[in-house]
Amino acid sequence: MRISDVAERTGIPSRLLRYYEERDLLVPSRNSSGYREYSEQDVAIATHIRQLLDAGMSTAAIRTVLPCLRDKAGQLAPTCSVTVADLERERARIEASIESLTQSRDAISRVISAG
């Protein structure tokens, strides 16, 4: 299927699908004319990439863990033990960001309250 079909099915703009390809996250085949040809598996992978990006993961981290994830009844599940460690590191990074943002929010709230 064409990139416009994938964009319509996933809600992911064509520009982002090309970006995923540039970052080696998505590798559609090419036809004899050089046009991208997406498979059903590519649609699923693009959806998983979007889910992981929405969860706060970087494209570099996704590139590491994506090959070791499978779709298990509509949910991503790790298939490699190293993936769990990578995901735990990502979770710790996100938790640290949340803590930092919470401190910033609380500082702003104190300034507002003081006014």
Image (cartoon, rainbow, N blue to C red):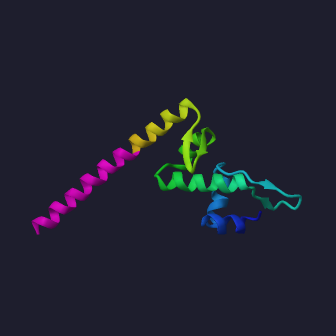
Q: Give the overall secondary structure of the magenta segment.
A: helix
Q: Which residues are magenta?
A: 94-115
Q: Residue at x 74, y 54 (%)?
A: 28
| Closer to us: 84 or 58 | 84
Q: Residue at x 34, y 44 (%)?
A: 96
| Relative side of 72 to 54, left or right | right
Looking at the picture, does residue 16 appear above or below residue 25?
A: below
Q: Position of residue 69 (x, y in %)?
A: 59, 41
Asked if the magenta segment contains residue 41, the reply would be: no
Q: Residue at x 70, y 54 (%)?
A: 42
Q: Residue at x 75, y 55 (%)?
A: 39
Q: Position of residue 20 (x, y in %)?
A: 63, 55
Numbered disc total? 0
- Where the C terminus falls, by quadrant? bottom left
Q: Position of residue 66 (x, y in %)?
A: 60, 43
User: Given the current orientation, which residue lies at the most extreme right position?
Assistant: 32
